[in-house]
Image (cartoon, helix red, strand yellow):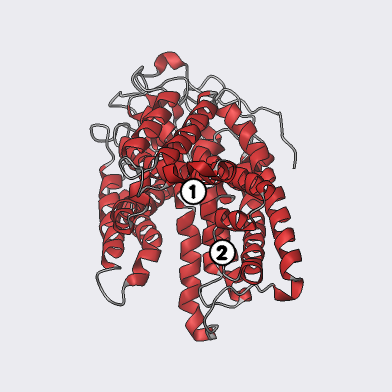
Amino acid sequence: MRLSTTTQPIVKADRAQYDPTLYNEDIVPLKEQRWGSYNIFAFWMSDVHSVGGYVTAGSLFALGLSSWQVLVSLFIGIVLVQIFVNLVAKPSQVTGVPYPVINRAIFGIKGANIPAIIRGIIAIAWYGVQTFLASESLAIILLKFWPSLAPYYDVDQHSFLGLSPVGYLCYFILWLAQAILFWNGIESIRKFIDWAGPAVYVVMIVLAGYLVSQAGVNNISLNLSNGPVLGFAESIPVMLTAIALVVSYFSGPMLNFGDISRFANSYEAVKKGNFWGLPVNFLFFSLLTVITASATMPVFGQLMTDPIETVNAIGTPFAIILGGFTFMLATVGINIVANFIAPAFDFSNVAPHKISWRAGGFIAAVGSIFLTPWNWYANDQAIHYTLGLLGGLIGPLFGILIAGYYKAARESVKVADLYTRNPQGLYWFSGGYNKNALFALIAAAIPAIAAILASPLVPGLSWLADFSWFIGCGISYAVMVACEKKNPQIKPALAASTPEADQLITK
C-alpha cells in the first residue's frame, strides 16, 4: 500500500446558504480528500499498538481457552469491528463531514449535540488516563538515569492530590507534547501516525526476538492460562465473551470513525485500510504480544502482560530507553487518534461559530486534568460507574446512526440541510430534534446501563456487562427502524445531484 495523493472533489452547497452558527472551517464538507489506504491502516496501527491493546490481547489468552479458540475469538471479534467500522465510515467519507455533523441528519440539527457531548465526555476521561499511562513510561526512563529522584516519585513521601512531583512533571511533559502535535493540525497528526505505528512494530519484534532467544523456543507457549484448559462446551460462553471484549475495546473509535474516514479519497481506500489495519494488524500484534508475554515466564519467573513492566525487568539502559520511549509513543498515538480528534469535532459541533476544532480539543485536554486521572484510574468503582455508564451509551448511538442512515435515509444526505436552521430543512424535524432517535436512545440506554450496573450486584449476571454494547446497539437499531417505519421523520434526499446542486446524494 502506498500513500495516495489523488483528490476527490465534494459537491457542496454555497456556504452563503449555511447558517453561521452551524459551521466553521473545520466541520464543513472537505474540498479535497487526500488520505489513502495506508493512512487508514496507520490510524489503526496507532489505535492497536498501545499498552492497553497489549494488555487486552494478552488477557484473552489467559481466559482458559486453547490457542486456536483464542485466535478464532480474536478473528471473529475483529472482523465484526471491521464490518461495523465500514458501516459508520461511509456517510462521512462520501459527504466529507465529521461524525457529529452527519448525526444532524439522524438526531436533528440540535439533537446531534447529544451524541457529540456523550462521546466527548468519554474521550476526555480516556484522554487523561492514556496521558497518565504514557507518563508512567517516561517516569521509568527518568528514574533509570536519575535514581536520586525516586523519593519524589513515591506518593507516600511527596504527593499533591494523589500524584508525586515526578508524576506531575512527566504528565505535563506528555500533555504538552500532545497539545503541540494537535495544535499543528490534522496533517501533522497524519504524518505522526504514519510512522509511529510501524516504529512500534519494529520494537515489538525486537523485544519478542530478544526474550525468545533468552527463554528458548521450546519454552514458548501460546496458552497463558495457569488453570486447566476449558472443554468445548465450557469454552463457548468464554469465546463469546472474548469476542464481545474485542468489540467493546474498539467501540469508542469505531463510533466516531467518520472523523477519520472523511479525509479518505474513496470508500474503497477506507475498506482496504480497515482490512489491513484491523484483522491483519490486530491478529499479528496479538501474536507478538502473546509470544512476548509467554517468554517472560521462563526469563523472569513470572508472567508479565504489561510491556512497560517487561522492559523495566530487562534492566539495561538501552532496553528501558527504547522500550519505554516506544510504548510512550504508542500511547500518545492512540490518545491523539481516539481521544483528541473525537472531542475536538464533538465540542466544536456544539457551537461551531464560537468553538473551533483546536478549541474543542483543548477543552478535552484541560478537562482531563481536572479529573485527576491518576486517582480515577486507580479506583475500580469510579471507572465502573463513570466510564461503564457512559460506555453503555456507545452501542445505542451506533445502532441509531446505522439505522438512520442505511434504513431510513436510504444512504442519502442533503448536505446543505446539515447547516441550516430553516424549519423547512430536512433535518430540523421537531424544533431541531428527531424524536424517534431520542426515544430509541432512551429505550436502548436503560437496559444497556442496567446490564453494567447489575453485573457486580447480582450473582450470575456478571457476564451481562461484557455484552452491553451489543444489547444497546441491537435494541436501538430495532427501535429506531420501528419508529421510523411507523412515524417517519428522516426523509431520503431523492433529488439527483449535479455540480450546481445544493445537495449531495450518497449511495
Label annotation for residue 229: none
Quadrant of residue 65 within the rendered picture: bottom right
Find residue 104 and report its horizontal and vertical position in percent.
37, 35
Q: Secondary structure at mark 2?
A: loop
Residue 4 placement: quadrant: top right
In the displayed structure, 506 sits above or below 478; it is: above
Outermost residue to the front: 148
In the image, residue 82 sits, relative to residue 37, either above or below, namely below
Mark yes or no: residue 335 visible.
yes
- For the N terminus, the image quarter is top right
In this rendered view, identify the residue nearer to me: 365 or 376. 376
Residue type at mark 2 is Met
Q: Does residue 233 sit above or below 102 in this rendering?
A: below
Can residue 409 be seen here? no
372 and 469: which one is in front? 372
Locate residue 148, reporting x and y percent. 51, 42
Residue 167 lies left or right of residue 323; in this view the side is left
- Residue that badge 1 annotates: 254
Within 10 Å of the Cα at label 1, are there few (<14), some (14-19), or many (20+) other Cα atoms?
Answer: many
Label 1, secondary structure: give it.
helix
Amino acid bearing label 1: Met
Disc marking residue 304: 2
Task: Identify which residue, 146 or 124, lies in the foreground.
Answer: 146
Q: CA distance from mark 1 to mark 2?
A: 29 Å
In-image side of 111 versus 399 (left or right): left
- Residue at image location 36% in from the left, 17% down from the top: 20
Residue 311: give x, y in percent of width and height.
62, 54
Residue 245 drawn at (x, y percent): 47, 63
- Choose mark 1 or mark 2, whichever is in front: 2
Q: Residue at x 50, y 73 (%)?
A: 63
